[in-house]
Amino acid sequence: MTRAEGPGAAGVDPRELWLSPDRPRRGRRPAFSREAITAAAVALADAEGIDAVTMRRVAAEVGAGVMSLYSYAPDKETLLDLMIDHVSGELPASAPLTGDWRTDLKAVGHLQRDHMLRHPWLPAAVRTRRTPGPNTLAFLEHALAALRPSGLDGAARLEIFAQLTAFVAGHVAHEVAQAEAARSPGRAAAEARYLAAVAADGRHPELAEALSATGRPLTPDATFNRFLTRLVDGLDAG
């Protein structure tokens, strides 16, 4: 693979990465493939987090030498692109649409959240990657089709999809962090006592009122649905 050209360019030329077939190099046919390498990297990230994904670890998982991996993924950045597109194949790119763009966009958001919760390393990864592969493009096409009834032009629909993805990624990252914190009940109890003390000190009346509000379910699903509804219903299609 060749690297992209141009000042400051980094990584592999996207045309070669995504438009060239995964074919073996000259010589003896390898016992692994780009698909196997990517799947091994995804399994590592799912189990241990993205920091566990190194070329050495992935090579060990597929039973290959580290240097042999570089003809398929010359650096971790390229491997991350492959990983994101690999798991994007799980997203239903042909789910039926209702024709109500807000309803369909909310459905897209829920699909993204479920997807990112299955792969908790994704929220951080999607914020830094810019070159969509074929599976990612298929889901993007679905999301843009969902937005067509809004009457917005293509550029605006792309912006909305980017805004939605950024929202879902940020929310899931927070959700995962909260779930981790909940595994330490002592810490959670200490934080609750601290906030109660702050609310009672008389210097934070707005916070005190907010903390005393009741009646809204605080489950992760309900919270996400409220935030998503506010975001989508607040979009202006004019």
Image: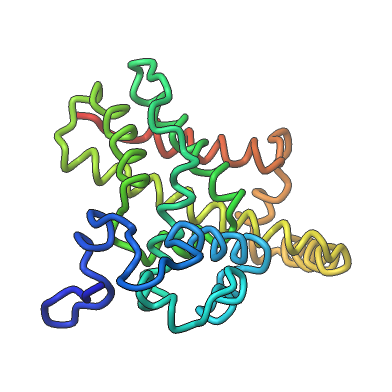
Instruction: Name the residue nearer the viewer: 232 or 3.
Output: 3
Q: Quadrant of the C terminus?
A: top left
Q: Quadrant of residue 114?
A: top right
Left or right: where does residue 10 sit relative to residue 69?
Answer: left
Would you place residue 70 above or below residue 196 in this image? Answer: below
> Which residue: 32% across, 69% down?
25
> Which residue: 72% across, 33% down?
215
Q: Report the number of numbered marks.
A: 0
Indicate the position of residue 139 as horizontal and vertical percent values: 36, 39
Left or right: where does residue 101 sit relative to residue 53?
Answer: left
Left or right: where does residue 135 sit relative to residue 57?
Answer: left
Would you place residue 170 above or below residue 203 in this image? Answer: above
Outermost residue, right direction? 186
> Which residue: 12% across, 82% down?
7
Outermost residue, front direction? 28
Q: Quadrant of residue 103?
A: top left
Indicate the position of residue 134 as horizontal and vertical percent values: 31, 47
> Which residue: 41% across, 19% down?
96
Instruction: Name the residue nearer the viewer: 91 or 208.
Output: 91
Indicate the position of residue 32 as horizontal and vertical percent values: 49, 64
Q: Quadrant of the N terminus?
A: bottom left
